[in-house]
Image: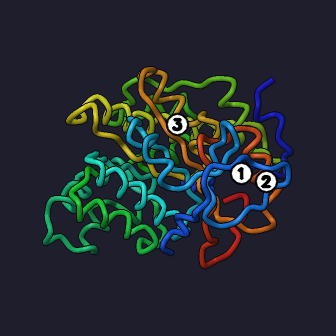
Amino acid sequence: MLRMKLRNISQIKPLVFQFIFSALFIYGHLGCTTLQPKPSFEVGQIYDVSDQTLLTVDDLIPHLLAADVIFLGEEHYTPSHIEAAITVLDMLRKHQRLPGLAMEMLSWDGQAGLDRYINKPEMTVAEFLEESRWKENWGGDFPDYQPLVDYARTYHLPLLGLNPPRSLVRLVATKGLTEALRASDFASWTMTEGVTNNPEYESLIFEQITACHPKLPDHVYRRIFEASIIRDEGMATIIRNFLDKRPTPQTPLVSYTGGGHIQYDVPVPKRVKRTHPAIKTVTIYLVAWDPSKNEEILAELHEGIADYVWLTPLGPNGLQPRCG
């Protein structure tokens, strides 16, 4: 039986279908200690999920330095998660690893604008938003993500858009995958390894779709699911392309997406490893902690949601809804 089937449906941390429907506490002087049966969760804790021990940020360094891809899974619009990502990027740079940064909030059709923003200091934010097609694709408040984008600009890091254009995702959601793949709009955005699915992925995604959108017709569920395939396979394609073209084998990529795209190593990480089985990856699941999440976090630790779980402060809007 797939491990995600063991979860209580009320504890599912769903993918947010965005295209469809403090100084970091960072380190408590914690040391490595074993997780107790009834742990006392608090902001700043980092758990090694494999053996359920507490770590400091410094304990992560050797794992980050050995990785080809570091998958960070955020809760959208949470400032402490941007800060955590910047902390990871800082650690890599300070150890002579000049990483690339790939973001779910940025899309393929805006890549030329991303490149210009990194390389042209005279380019304004307004120009960046237009050329990156921010409004057409992600569409949320850019200031929430600007610190991470500007970090890449300050240190001249490669900045990659992970998401397929919204128009393609919408095409799949409305017409279905088979018909969408025949459309001329898709021809110029070929995914190098094709579109694939597997039972583990299908189980995970359908479990979340039906929990968040009950009582929809079956064909609607199928199209939402197929749109999720396009998004995850598209993100994996960008990461695979980076790995194939990176300047040196010691050049890592930090992938910054919603947590749903990395959970249980399935949606994006497994797709990357399908064609690059030898790469080393690290998955870090960022959780904006609140006492009401204790049972959920405990379940995620026991079920292996990622390599590491990092508890951070809530964002200014407090607890986020489970379904976007």
* Residue type for callout 1: Lys
Q: Is residue 270 left or right of residue 298?
A: left
Rendered residue at 26%/57% (across/down): 114
* Residue type for callout 2: Glu
Residue 216 percent coordinates (x, y) = 79, 47
Residue 156 percent coordinates (x, y) = 21, 57
Mark 3 or 2, closer to the camera: 2
Q: Which mark is residue 146?
A: none
Compared with residue 323, is residue 183 higher up or lower down, i.e. above or below? above
Q: Name the residue furthest bottom.
A: 316
Q: Is residue 162 left or right of residue 251?
A: right
> Which residue has dot 3 on it?
268
The mark nearer the N terminus, 1 or 2, is: 1
Residue 26 percent coordinates (x, y) = 52, 65
Q: Say what secondary structure mark 1 lies in.
A: loop
Q: Which mark is residue 13?
A: 1
Separation of disc 3 and disc 2 at Cα? 22 Å
Badge 2 local density, few (<14 within 10 Å), some, or many (20+)? some
